[in-house]
Image (cartoon, rainbow, N blue to C red):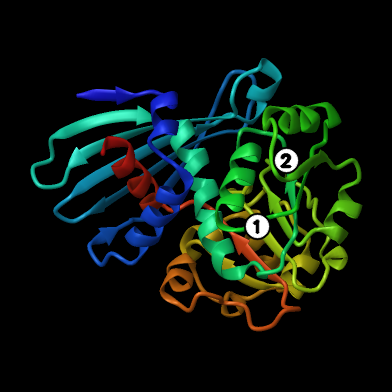
Amino acid sequence: MHFFGPDEVAQRLPWVALVESIEAILLDSNAVAPERTVHSIEVLNNDDASLLLKPAWVVGDVVAVKVVTFFPNNGTLGLSTVNAGVLLFDAKNGTMLGACDGNELTTRRTAAASAVAAKRLVRPDAQNLLIVGTGALSPMAIAAHSSVHTYRTVEVWGRSGNKASDVVASLGSSEQEITRCDDLDEGVSRADVICCVTGATEPLVKGALLKPGAHVDLIGSFTPQMRESDDDVMRRGSVWVDTKTDGILAGDLAQPLASGVLSEGDLKGDLRDLVAGPPSARQSADEITVFKSAGIALEDVAAARLVFG
């Protein structure tokens, strides 16, 4: 039984192959993903920690279980706020095949899932990508989005300008112009695609500032208290989710649903609908589109199968 560390996971999950693997599993009738479970964890420093359990399987192939912890105060300790591991089993006999680092797998499959949606929702002439957030997902989101669309400029905004500069510097040389964004509102107003990868509990992206035809990719929030976009984003946008069951639990949807700004009937569909549908799901060039990602366990299976070969 082999354990794949983060470096091995990264090597085995190239972007194009990962995007295609996620697309394939979403259309596989033998793929099953029960609801995730989320538990609160009491810790000594009063941190509002969480434990997530996400199982999924493909009949006759593999069973995967991802275990995730979220400790939001870890940043002050120099530790990752999210930590995860994935166990893989043979679905024919239940034997354990191995395990792998879940952090690298999660960041890559999460970014790749947004790229799957972006392939179908971003305008063909989109030029400017804005990344909101400076954590581990920030460079991943740039790479994933850039694997399905060519952007002329990429901007990175963070509450800490120094951290945003660090993300830009970490990307090295590129054909793209990659710079730090110092004013979020200005960045939002000029961006064709806005990708949010934060742990925010107050809205960052203002819908009133979105340009016609913009695409908003919301990745960070996964609890009802977390939110990256305001009500105007939901009012103006055509909203898609990776999965309705989990997506409506995240604050970006849960809060406007609770207040009546949004109804479940307003949701256009899920990631499976996007993959099964036409190459472009846009209704017009000026349509504002929104994709809310909460994470699908099938994405973990798609990634794990690539890792384990």
Q: Amino acid at mark 1?
A: Asp
For the residue labelled by badge 2, is the local secondary structure a helix, a strand or a loop?
loop
Q: Nearer the viewer, residue 301 or 140?
A: 140
The furthest residue to the bottom: 283
Which residue is identified by label 2?
Answer: 133
**Residue 87 location, x and y as percent?**
29, 34
Q: Quadrant of residue 99?
A: top left
Q: Quadrant of residue 64?
A: top left
Q: Quadrant of the N terminus?
A: top left
Residue 29's image quarter?
A: bottom left
Report the side of 133 relative to 57 (left or right). Answer: right
Q: Callout 1: 10 Å neighbours few (<14), some, many (20+)? A: many
Who's the residue at 65% across and 55% down the image?
Answer: 218
Q: Residue at x 51, y 47 (%)?
A: 110
In this rendering, position of residue 242 left or right of residue 31: right
Measure how far apart labels 2 and 1 are at the Cα level: 12 Å
On the image, numbered disc 1 is attached to which residue?
Answer: 217
Q: Secondary structure at mark 1?
A: strand
At 33% across and 47% down in the image, what residue appears? 301
Q: Position of residue 77 (x, y in %)?
A: 66, 16
Q: Amino acid at mark 2?
A: Gly
